[in-house]
């Protein structure tokens, strides 16, 4: 019996020892696992803080780029105004008075100016205190501006633009509003300090933005300041920023809710251009709270396990260990998933983030390689996004949010919408046919056009361009798909706004797909062309061509306008390309020829002198009918001298089919018509075409006059083009003449004829008859006045 008892005690001792060992192992494993969870949570939170601060910096860079582009447009307009207002050789007083008077009219614009004497380097005027105390030379002047232009007259130079001080103030105001609106689930927030002295001390920095301590904004910060436990966080911040430009740190801060000291983890990064330190912090308690929640949940279970173990129920201990292990793993997975969810959402739009998109594309690429599920990727770019800045500094945020909301409603269960960068969005559609992107794009256009204007704060004129490509099993990474989509967007934008381009399977370059709206408009115009011709809804207007020596009207150009009930008054740039694509342009051009001949008859009956009229013909006219025969027959039918009708052919039409067009030009000449070459100099084969074909006149492309008339290189090309035409026995005509200075310069070069808004805009027949009857306006050749 004694031996049996001793054996039982030995068994009990072994069981107790094993139980104690398993209990120790249980607590050790739990503590180790909880420590790992805590470390993972801190690592994920650091990643979240850094990614969010970098997103804010990217937003700052985008806003600066947009604002600089906007102000560059304003400055360009001001430069033209100054050029007109300033005398050619002003003295110092006249120069300064003209500048101050000019900028006094635009005091509501954030434009500063500085006037400098170029001979002495002396600053003559700096009313906005643009220059810093360290200014010493003209060369350093431009560094005081964010964006600026120079204006020089004689010995004086004006530099005007958006000063760095004003730019920093505007950006700080915009950033202030944005950071005060940000709300994070875990009580995180972003603040900004502006460094004053990188050597530290009592004037180390100014608190620029702080959402929770707004009453301290503008306060000076010192590197000697201590936190709730006596540490010097600003000194630590300065040393880390100076060495690495960024740092992670921690300090103790009184919580606004209860005033108790709490430890914070912080990421800070230096924005060097303005000396801003942009920081974001989270409370360690919030991170540890989720970890401790799991530990607190398991506390009662450990007590029960201990009681059961003390009662020598060994298998319950084992079961408890298993339960503890799996529950801790579940809590760990839940915590990691919550952190990943935060990183997957874009704070600016509420759509998926760029990080989430990259992970989703990698997964789709892997599925495609296994042949499981295809994916169609579409990159959408908001057209003229930066141009909407004039609607207000908050307009960009509103546009992004509304476009994201509208497009999110189009998604199916498996689809994905992600904000990629600035005004770019990615759609991930699980389709196999890339041509279906056209239908998706049409839905996107409709959704965006339905955004209410009162929500945007301006009239909804938003359009988008897009590029699409399928994920291929041959792709080595998602970056190849993104690059194809970016290339397709470039092709779409090259053709204007509101277009879609797609990489079809097996193609090396994207193919342009006409937008649904343009497609519908093209179908409508083609279907209603015959009706518009019948009802004379297509009007013919005449713009005068002036003889340079006499400034009398020697010819007029016929231009068409379409007055439609649905689309209103349309210029040729709208309907001519659509009719050319449909090969119906010849019907329009023959109608214009007949309308001009009828107007000749009206003028002849009214006793008005007849002058030649030029008519533009498309290259597609010659593919669809015998244009020479048709025009000749119309002239004979209305009894109009063929010398009164001038045929204009563009350089691009000649290059398309040289043999056919050469034969047509010869036949027009043989039939008694004059033939002009339009848009000379707009292509790459102008000289070759002049060598092969005979013309009576060349019309110099208006870009020579409008783009940079003050350029010596441009003027040299103009002069030599005119001289070459005269050497060939051809007259030269310049389009786009809008200023008297241009006309005088062209006349001095020996130009034969000129055309442009300086003389008159396109007019209808009634206006021309009234002008001839009353002898007002520009005189015609042959008139006795």
Image (cartoon, helix red, strand yellow):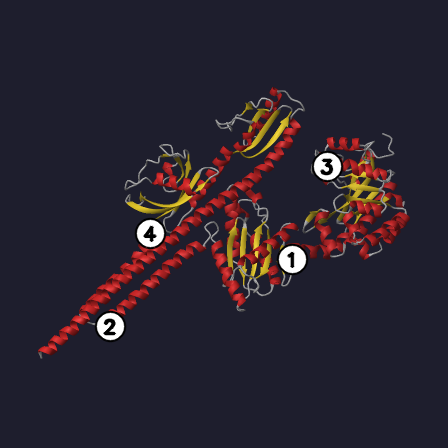
Q: Earlier in the sequence, mark 2 or mark 4?
A: 4
Q: Nearer the viewer, residue 335 or 431?
A: 335
Foreground tag (4 vs 1):
1
Residue 638 at what x, y percent from top left? Answer: 88, 48
**In the visual, does 557 lie left or right of 429?**
right
How many labels, in total?
4
CA separation, marks 3 and 2?
95 Å
Q: Earlier in the sequence, mark 4 or mark 3?
A: 4
CA separation, marks 3 and 1?
35 Å
Q: Which residue is mark 3?
A: 714
Q: Earlier in the sequence, mark 2 or mark 1?
A: 2
- For the point 69% across and 36% down, the residue is 708
Q: Which residue is mark 4?
A: 286
Quarter of the image with the N terminus in it: bottom left
- For the point 69% across and 57% down, the residue is 523
Element marked by disc 4: helix
Element marked by disc 3: helix
Element marked by disc 1: loop
Q: Which residue is mark 2?
A: 315
Q: Which residue is mark 1?
A: 509
CA separation, marks 4 and 3?
67 Å
């Amino acid at each position: 019996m004694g031996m049996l008892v001793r054996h039982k005690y030995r068994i009990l001792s072994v069981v107790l020892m094993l139980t104690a060992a398993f209990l120790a192992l249980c607590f050790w494993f739990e503590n180790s696992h909880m420590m790992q969870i805590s470390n993972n949570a801190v690592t994920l939170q650091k990643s979240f803080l850094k990614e969010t601060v970098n997103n804010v910096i990217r937003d700052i860079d985008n806003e600066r780029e947009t604002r600089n582009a906007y102000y560059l447009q304003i400055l360009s307009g001001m430069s033209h105004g100054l050029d007109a207002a300033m005398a050619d050789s002003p003295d110092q007083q006249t120069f300064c008075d003209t500048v101050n008077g000019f900028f006094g009219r635009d005091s509501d614009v954030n434009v500063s100016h500085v006037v400098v004497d170029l001979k002495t380097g002396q600053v003559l005027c700096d009313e906005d205190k643009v220059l810093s105390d360290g200014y010493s030379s003209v060369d350093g002047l431009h560094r005081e501006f964010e964006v600026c232009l120079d204006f020089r007259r004689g010995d004086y130079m004006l530099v005007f633009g958006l000063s760095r001080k004003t730019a920093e103030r505007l950006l700080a105001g915009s950033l202030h509003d944005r950071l005060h609106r940000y709300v994070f689930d875990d009580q995180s927030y972003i603040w900004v300090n502006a460094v004053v002295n990188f050597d530290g001390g009592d004037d180390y920095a100014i608190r620029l933005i702080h959402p929770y301590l707004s009453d301290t904004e503008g306060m000076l910060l010192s590197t000697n300041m201590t936190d709730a436990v006596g540490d010097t966080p600003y000194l630590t911040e300065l040393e880390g920023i100076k060495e690495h430009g960024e740092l992670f740190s921690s300090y103790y801060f009184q919580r606004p809710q209860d005033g108790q000291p709490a430890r914070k983890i912080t990421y800070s990064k230096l924005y060097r251009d303005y000396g801003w330190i942009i920081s974001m912090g989270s409370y360690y308690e919030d991170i540890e709270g989720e970890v401790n929640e799991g530990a607190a949940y398991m506390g009662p279970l450990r007590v029960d396990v201990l009681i059961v173990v003390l009662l020598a129920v060994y298998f319950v201990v084992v079961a408890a260990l298993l339960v503890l292990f799996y529950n801790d793993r579940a809590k760990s997975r839940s915590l990691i998933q919550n952190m990943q969810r935060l990183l997957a959402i874009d704070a600016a739009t509420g759509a998926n983030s760029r990080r989430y998109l990259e992970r989703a594309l990698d997964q789709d690429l892997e599925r495609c390689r296994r042949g499981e599920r295809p994916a169609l990727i579409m990159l959408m770019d908001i057209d003229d996004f930066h141009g909407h800045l004039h609607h207000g500094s908050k307009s960009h945020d509103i546009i992004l949010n509304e476009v994201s909301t509208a497009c999110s409603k189009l998604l199916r269960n498996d689809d994905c919408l992600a904000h990629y960068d600035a005004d770019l969005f990615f759609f991930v559609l699980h389709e196999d046919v890339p041509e279906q992107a056209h239908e998706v794009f049409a839905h996107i256009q409709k959704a965006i056009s339905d955004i209410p204007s009162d929500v945007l704060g301006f009239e909804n004129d938003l359009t988008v361009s897009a590029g699409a490509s399928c994920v291929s099993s041959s792709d080595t990474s998602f970056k190849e798909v993104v690059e194809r989509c970016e290339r397709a967007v470039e092709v779409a934008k090259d053709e204007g706004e509101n277009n879609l381009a797609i990489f079809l399977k097996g193609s090396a370059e994207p193919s342009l797909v006409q937008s649904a709206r343009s497609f519908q408009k093209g179908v409508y115009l083609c279907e209603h062309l015959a009706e518009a011709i019948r009802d004379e809804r297509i009007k013919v207007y005449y713009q005068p061509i002036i003889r340079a020596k006499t400034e009398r009207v020697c010819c007029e150009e016929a231009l068409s306008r379409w007055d439609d009930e649905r689309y209103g008054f349309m210029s040729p740039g709208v309907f001519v390309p659509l009719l050319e694509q449909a090969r119906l342009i010849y019907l329009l051009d023959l109608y214009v020829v007949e309308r001009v001949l009828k107007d000749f008859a009206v003028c002849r009956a009214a006793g008005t002198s007849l002058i030649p009229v030029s008519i533009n013909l498309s290259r597609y006219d010659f593919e669809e009918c015998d244009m020479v025969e048709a025009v000749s027959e119309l002239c004979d039918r209305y009894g109009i001298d063929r010398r009164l009708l001038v045929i204009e052919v563009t350089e691009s039409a000649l290059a398309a089919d040289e043999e056919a067009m050469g034969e047509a030009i010869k036949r027009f000449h043989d039939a008694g018509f004059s033939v002009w070459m339009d848009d000379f100099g707009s292509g790459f084969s102008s000289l070759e075409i002049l060598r092969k074909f005979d013309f009576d006149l060349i019309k110099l492309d208006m870009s020579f006059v409008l783009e940079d008339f003050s350029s010596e290189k441009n003027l040299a090309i103009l002069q030599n083009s005119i001289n070459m035409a005269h050497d060939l026995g051809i007259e030269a005509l310049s389009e786009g003449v809008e200023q008297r200075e241009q006309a005088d310069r062209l006349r001095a070069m020996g130009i034969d004829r000129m055309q442009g808004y300086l003389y008159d805009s396109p007019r209808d027949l009634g206006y021309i008859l009234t002008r001839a009857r009353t002898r007002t306006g520009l005189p015609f050749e042959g008139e006795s006045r």
